[in-house]
Image: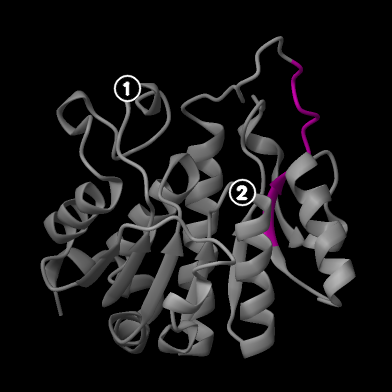
């Protein structure tokens, strides 16, 4: 066993470590939430990770995204993330897909190849399409809801989409799931009422997206322990 996973093994055992090593996770979106989810998944010893994102690192990302540094500005997020994962776990098999996932190109990704799907997409249409396909194919998925315009990192909850509140993104996803007949969806959301700003942009900070991402990542790892 890799020596860096000894302390993890103390909690989950040798079999748990082996299950994670055999797992293949795909994560959509590696921004404020997705980057921290990816960090947890990589540091837990997951053996194969596919990352999907079309963006490059911008200066405005530095306040909340773990892969955003002055040294990474202008680089594609998937390449920066790939290098980071390999620096954490050189044995991890990493596939980087520089694409903006949409209903129009969703067929390019075969979800049957993966043990677990992590949804950290911001766009409702793309998010719902991914959720719909996972539901259709019986693939386990966890979805992050809105982390913007929030200040209370202790207000985060793991729940079903139909038990969410105080979250505009969750409301939109919930409505679409109901229309599609999707009966359940595991999500991480915030019970905090969004803070109103006078900007056209969504406000953010260093801690709420990070906390949400860590929870998403931890739930993914725990789910893998039971499904792989």
Q: Split into 4 quadrants, where in the image is the C terminus?
A: bottom left
- Could you tell me how many numbered marks the image carries? 2
- Mark 2: secondary structure: loop
- As drawn, is 139 to the left or to the right of 99? right
Residue at image position (83%, 38%) is: 166
- The image quadrant of residue 202 is top right
Q: Is residue 106 above or below residue 96?
A: below
The circle on residue 59 is 1
Residue contact at pointers 1 and 2, CB within 8 angstroms = no
Front label number (1 vs 2): 2
- As drawn, is 147 to the left or to the right of 49? right
Q: Is residue 228 above or below residue 143?
A: below
Assess whether residue 194 is covered by the magenta stretch. yes
- Mark 1: secondary structure: helix
Q: Is residue 173 above or below residue 49?
A: above
Where are the magenta residues, as a range? 187-196
């Amino acid at each position: 066993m890799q020596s860096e996973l000894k302390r993890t093994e103390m909690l989950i055992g040798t079999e748990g470590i082996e299950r994670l090593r055999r797992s293949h996770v795909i994560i959509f979106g590696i921004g404020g939430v997705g980057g921290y989810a990816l960090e947890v998944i990589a540091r837990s010893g997951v053996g194969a990770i596919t990352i999907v994102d079309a963006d490059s690192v911008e200066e405005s990302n530095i306040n909340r995204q773990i892969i955003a540094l002055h040294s990474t500005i202008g680089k594609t997020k998937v390449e920066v993330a790939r290098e980071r994962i390999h620096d954490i776990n050189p044995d991890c098999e990493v596939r980087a897909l520089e694409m903006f996932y949409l209903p129009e190109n969703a067929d390019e990704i075969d979800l049957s190849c993966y043990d677990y799907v992590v949804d950290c997409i911001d766009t409702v249409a793309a998010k719902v399409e991914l959720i719909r396909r996972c539901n259709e194919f019986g693939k386990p998925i966890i979805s992050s809801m809105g982390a913007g315009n929030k200040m209370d990192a202790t207000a985060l909850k793991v729940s079903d989409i139909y038990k969410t509140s105080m979250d505009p993104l969750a409301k939109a996803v919930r409505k679409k799931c109901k229309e599609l007949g999707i009966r359940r969806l595991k999500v991480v959301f915030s019970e905090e009422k969004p803070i109103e700003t006078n900007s056209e942009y969504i406000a953010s900070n260093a801690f709420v997206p990070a906390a949400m991402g860590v929870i998403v990542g931890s739930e993914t790892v725990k789910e893998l322990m039971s499904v792989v």
